[in-house]
Amino acid sequence: MKYIKSYESLAHTTKIGNYVIVESESIFTNVKEFINNSIGKIVDIVSNVSTPLKVKYINIPKGIKHYFDNTRSFYIKQIKYISTNREDLKPFLIANKYNI
């Protein structure tokens, strides 16, 4: 698990292939809940756009699948947790689920 120190920047530690838990700003509750409670994988970082991160999710429910264009774009500031290993992020999802 990569802990970001106060002097480090997420922009410099974010890499393609990293796993993330993102804080969604979607106005649709079901989309927001799915994103906030799922682990995504960074598949692209674009430097010249306002939302530079392209995050891919798996097992998207059919009811919200049409809100995803294979990936979803996010700002770097929306990253809550980041890791090179998917398993490292699972405890954060469990803690969030049980409000620990």
Image (spheres, rainbow, N blue to C red):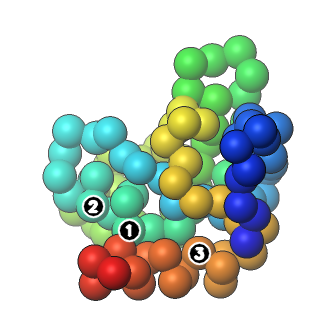
Q: For the residue labelled by badge 1, is the local secondary structure a helix, a strand or a loop?
A: loop
Q: Position of residue 86 (x, y in %)?
A: 66, 76
> Which of these two is toward me, 13 or 56?
13
Picture quarter with the N terminus: bottom right
Rendered location of residue 95, percent (x, y)? 39, 81
Disc 1 target residue: 37
Residue located 27% across and 61% down the image: 33
x, y percent for residue 25:
32, 39
Q: Earlier in the sequence, mark 3 or mark 2?
A: 2
Q: Is the residue 57 above or below the residue 4 in the image?
A: below
Give the farthest residue toward the top: 48
The CA span between labels 3 and 2 is 16 Å
**Mark number for residue 33?**
2
**In the picture, residue 53 is in which quadrant?**
top right
Q: Residue at x 56, y 19 (%)?
A: 50
The disc labelled 2 sits on which kind of residue?
Glu
Above or below, comparing residue 72 to residue 97 in the picture: above
Q: Residue at x 58, y 60 (%)?
A: 81
Q: Secondary structure at mark 3?
A: helix
Location of mark 3 (residue):
89
The CA span between labels 2 and 1 is: 6 Å
For the residues marked 1 and 3, what is the alpha-carbon distance in whole angstroms? 11 Å
**Viewed as shown, does residue 42 lie left or right of 64?**
right
Q: Nearer the viewer, mark 3 or mark 2?
A: 3
